[in-house]
Image (spheres, rainbow, N blue to C red):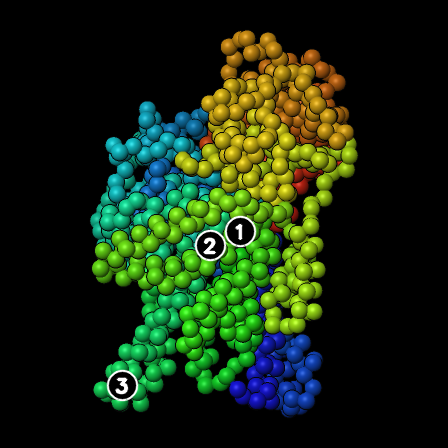
Amino acid sequence: MDKPDAMHPALALGLPLMLGGIGGAWLQLQQPLLWSGWAYGALALAALLLGLVLWGRQTSAGLAARALPSLGWLLVGAALLFASTGGRALWFQAGALAAELEGRELVLEGFVAGLPRQGELGWQFEFEVTQATLAEPSRRARQGARAEPADPTGPAGQTGQAGQTMQAGQAVQVPQRVRLAWFAPRPGRGATTQANTPGTLGTQALSPSSSLPELRAGQRWRLTARLQRPHGLANPGGFDFELRLWEQGIHATGSVRAGLGTPAPQLLGHGWHFPVQQARQWVRDRMQAQVQPPATAGVLAALVVGDQGAIPQTHWETFRITGVTHLMVVSGTHITLFAWMAMALIGLLWRVAGRRRPALLLAVPTPVAAAVGGLALGFVYAVFSGWGVPAQRAVLMLATLVLLQLSGRQWPWPFMWLAVMQMVVLLDPWALLSAGFWLSFVAVAILFATGQPLPTDGRSGRHYVLGLVRTQALMTLALAPLLLLWFGEFSLVGLLANLPAIPWVTLVVTPLALAGVLLWPLWLLAGWMIDALMLWLQALQHWPWAAITRPALPLALALLAALGGLLLVLRWPWSLRAWGLLLIWPALAYSPARPPPGHFEWLAADIGQGTAVIVRTQNHTLVYDTGPPMGPHSDAAERVLLPLLQRHGEVPAKVLISHIDADHASGIATLARAFPQTQWRTSFDTQPWGLSSQRCLAGQSWVWDGVPFRILHPGPEHYTTQRSDNAMSCVLQVGHGAASLLLTGDIYIDEETRLALAQPDLRAGVLFAAHHGSRTSTGPVWLNTLQPQWVVIQAAHRSRYGHPHPEVLARLQARAIPWVSTPQCGAAWGSSQRPEQVHCQRQQRQRYWQHPDGAGADR
């Protein structure tokens, strides 16, 4: 290794620049709103001027004193990356879908660009638009325009910004790449599809007689679609859908329209505009035809072409509990191992060829040929597997490492590690917000810091096995705090699962699956190996305490625990390493703060068109409604409620389902499996789910930790008459007086008025608008009686039912009652200690890549 003095200039300049650059990019990602281009340009210019001054002083003064120059270079790196990330974000934001085009019916012409995925509801695919025009409003849109008040941004509107009239057939500018869904028509309905909004998808599966055509990459189509800016659910600790599409360069999502006066989509031809995607689809289809069962074929398709949607949900559950999810997707691990194996093979072949032609070795040394060839093949695999963000990061990491190694210097590993991280951040600064970025870099750092864990000098198989066990044990221990921070879960059987799974999948299954592209019977062998591995994983999955869940950790405790995990795996004396246990213990013992006696907290989850509310007292938790279905095999309880409950370490003592409608009760089975000891209270029979429940009756009450709970509706007489499901909704009051919370289900104005007249002294601090803000609820008498300080509306973004209705909002405005709705607010929460305050997730964590509707939710 070079002497430290020889490395000193590079380290003195490079380390602060890279550290500052990574920090500057991270700071820019915390911006709620973007600055102007002039502001970012001025910051970059100032950073360059400071760099010139520092460079001049450094060359004239030598290398004697470096403390102040190092701080200066840190600021230069931070300012440059802050400015460049902000400038890129401005450029990207400029390509967003115009607000006046959201919800409009547009005629789009273009190509199927990505790998189409067919599910039980229809197709999902990426579409590259070459031409877009405004469509003639369909009969359904015209009917909606007559039924609802005019909305300049609604589906039937024809007026753009500043009053500019937009005519059918007029060319419009839309993002070049959009993500579309093409749903199968439901029986007994026209072919018009539902809007592609989270939480509003129907549950009707595709039938074999579905008339939907088969989509292939490279096809050219003319179709009618409605587009909207990306808008996902916003819940504490939840998945950021809008950030994911931002990273992928997708500015709009939408759904294909057909029927009711809308022209049917027209296939215009086939082309070779996307040969890689066509090849990927051909391989996936052939694999699915040759390998059985379909679940096994799905795993192989995920490893070869990166189609993660082909893996069934049951398999994902097994992978998650056993901690092997990272092996079943094309990640940086797969790309890296494939590239290293390719380097070894190319090096061997190059040496063999050099014996015949020594000039080859003189022209291109074996290390250079192996490194460049392996990197090239790794790039090909990354592109063929979909060129996802993890694959891009892996290729860039490999390229940086190869360049550093070919430079002829023996760079210190911290410098190489930081240089690779800096290059990844330059390519994709938004990767700093992903769990995979930090998990992969921390894992690599631990391997570097603890020495070479695997023998490479040809020692016995016993030493190899011991090295593998040690490596996996180090990773399991050191990454546990980060896994708890990001996912709130840690697999206790992960070590037993990964020990055979890592070499099995990466060194055997994946190479066989890739070789099967040329010789398909190898897929059968790879499939048998996947089936054998699944038997082992499923056995581990059903072990008691296979995985533990912990509440979401504060950042400070998580960082302390991560430092503790690092201390435990370093090659230091145990007298020092034992301090790691003390640093980890606070994270394991942490419990979120709860309300004091006599008070409660509530959280309205962002679940689309439906209702789901969590109420917490000092020692008890209640769930009111479980939200809507989300696709054919999932629901809001699985995707949103369970993670929220886990985040707070909650086990609900009672679940109350207001009524049987799907947007309120679809998660019954999910919560029943997760919490078998929970008590249930409903207004309908739960025997079809195998549950025993108590009937909601007006007058029922209980007290938890000094907080009264009282059911106001329905009464005994309502169960003896024929009434609609909505009218039978259980109405629950939590607390009392002006600090109370009132949960109303989907009752109508008639039920509201009866309750108000029967209890004229009834008050509410926070009122949940019944029926998601429909005009058939939240009537004048109800509002005048309750005099709420806030109204919360749970509805879907751009609800196809028009929720919340303008009449309801006008009633609130006339009474000066502030309100929030989940499409603009995201998850909303508050406390009986401060009933005048309602907090919104989109305002608590506002970021510039989010849908702009969230900017004005607080009132």
Pointers 3 and 2 in contact (CB under 8 A)? Answer: no
User: Does residue 229 appear anywhere in the picture?
Assistant: no
Q: Earlier in the sequence, mark 3 or mark 2?
A: 3
Mark 1 lies on residue:
491
Asked if 228 appears above or below 654 in the picture, the reply is below
Which residue type does callout 3 highlight? Gly
Which residue type does callout 2 highlight? Ala
Local crowd at mark 3 within 10 Å, few (<14), some, or many (≥20)?
some
Residue appearing at x 63%, y 16% in the figure: 697
Tag 3 secondary structure:
helix
Closer to us: mark 1 or mark 2?
A: 2
Local crowd at mark 1 within 10 Å, few (<14), some, or many (≥20)?
many
Q: Position of residue 473 (x, y in %)?
A: 53, 62
Q: Residue 560's quadrant in the figure? A: bottom right
Q: CA distance from mark 1 to mark 3?
A: 49 Å
Q: Earlier in the sequence, mark 1 or mark 2?
A: 1
Q: Position of residue 117 (x, y in %)?
A: 34, 46
Tag 2 secondary structure:
helix
What number is the disc on residue 319? none
Mark 3 lies on residue:
354
Q: CA distance from mark 1 to mark 2?
A: 9 Å
- Give the side of residue 832 with respect to residue 684, left or right: right
Mark 2 lies on residue:
497
- Give the side of residue 182 with respect to residue 24, left or right: left
Residue appearing at x 54%, y 52% in the figure: 492
Asked if 854 appears above or below 354 in the picture, the reply is above
Q: Position of residue 442 (x, y in %)?
A: 55, 65
